[in-house]
Amino acid sequence: MGWTSGLRVLDTAGTAPVETAAAAPNSWGYAHESHELTWVISGGATLILDGAHFRVDPERALWIPAGLAHEVRPDPGSLLLPLYIQVAEFGTAETRVRAISRTPEIEEVGRVLLQPGLTTASERAAKIAQLRRCVCAEEPAAGPRYPADPRALGVARSLAAFPASPLSMEQWAQRAMVSARTLQRHFVEETGFTFGQWRTHMRMAAASDLLRAGHAVSYVAVQVGYTNPPAFTTAFGREFGMPPSALHPETVAAR
């Protein structure tokens, strides 16, 4: 890990995924005086901001305003290149966390800003202006709130990491060495959702990512724990008000 031209290069090869409430050895928490665009070259990572979890991967970057403390939990073998932009340089007070789609325009912005030694001042200013337009146009990022209780939090992280797990709430409670009633209470009081609702929300969030990546509905259904594709389609429609096929890249491009 090192510093290069203002960019922190994070190579996480060999690290293990987070499955318990304890902090991962290769995670860290900090805040910057500059804005950050968390950029992934390969793999992915979960960023934790004020109890909410956000995913970044080659399809999606994350805009983090200056001064906002956050923790990074990289997936095994991931390569992250956080991109820092001075507040004065960005020029607009944007205080909300935003998920940024890796469109061709944003890819070009990243290519230029990640190579400061090959970029003129005018080119950098132009790309920051493009980034500013994209950041201000994007919808604020939304992340599900996780329970605060360490036992419930460990279960929640495992559910997020393994959405296809068939284990029941009682089985998860047994693993966490807590009663099912207590586990349910922590989810309801600390997230606003029952255990089942929270797990469904995480499964649908994972499914939307897979669908946008171009995977077939039948494949996605299995990956998020549904052996019956029609049941998955029903659950997805109830969650998002649209069929899974609506998020397939070909469908989105045709709109």
Image (tube, helix red, strand yellow):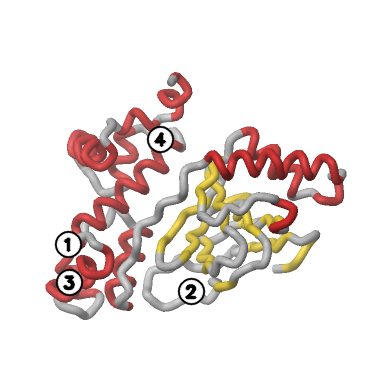
How packed mark 1 is, by other alpha carbons closer than 10 Å (few <14, some 14-19, many 20 or more), is few
The residue that appears at 81% across and 40% down in the rendered structure is: 123
Q: Specify which label sits upstream in the sequence, 3 or 2.
A: 2
C-alpha distance separating marks 1 and 2: 25 Å
- Earlier in the chain: of badge 4 and badge 3, it is 3
> Which disc is residue 168 wearing?
1
Q: Between 76 and 7, which is closer to the camera in this rendering?
A: 7
Amino acid at pointer 2: Ala
Q: In the depicted view, which residue is nearer to us: 222 or 156?
A: 156
Report the residue marked by disc 3: 185
Q: What element carries label 2?
A: loop
Which residue is pictured at 38% across the width and 32% down the height? 247
Q: Which residue is drawn at 53% across and 62% down?
A: 74
Report the amino acid beneath label 4. Answer: His
Asked whether the beta carbons under mark 2 and mark 4 sit within 8 Å of each other, the answer is no
Q: Name the residue under label 2.
A: 24
| Badge number at residue 215 | 4
Q: Which amino acid does label 3 sit on?
A: Arg
Graded by Cα atoms within 10 Å as few (under 14), some (14 to 19) or many (20 or more), the crowding at tag 2 reads: some
- Looking at the rendered structure, the kind of residue marked 1 is Ser
Q: In this view, does 51 lie above or below 64?
A: below
**Mark closer to the observer (4, 3):** 3
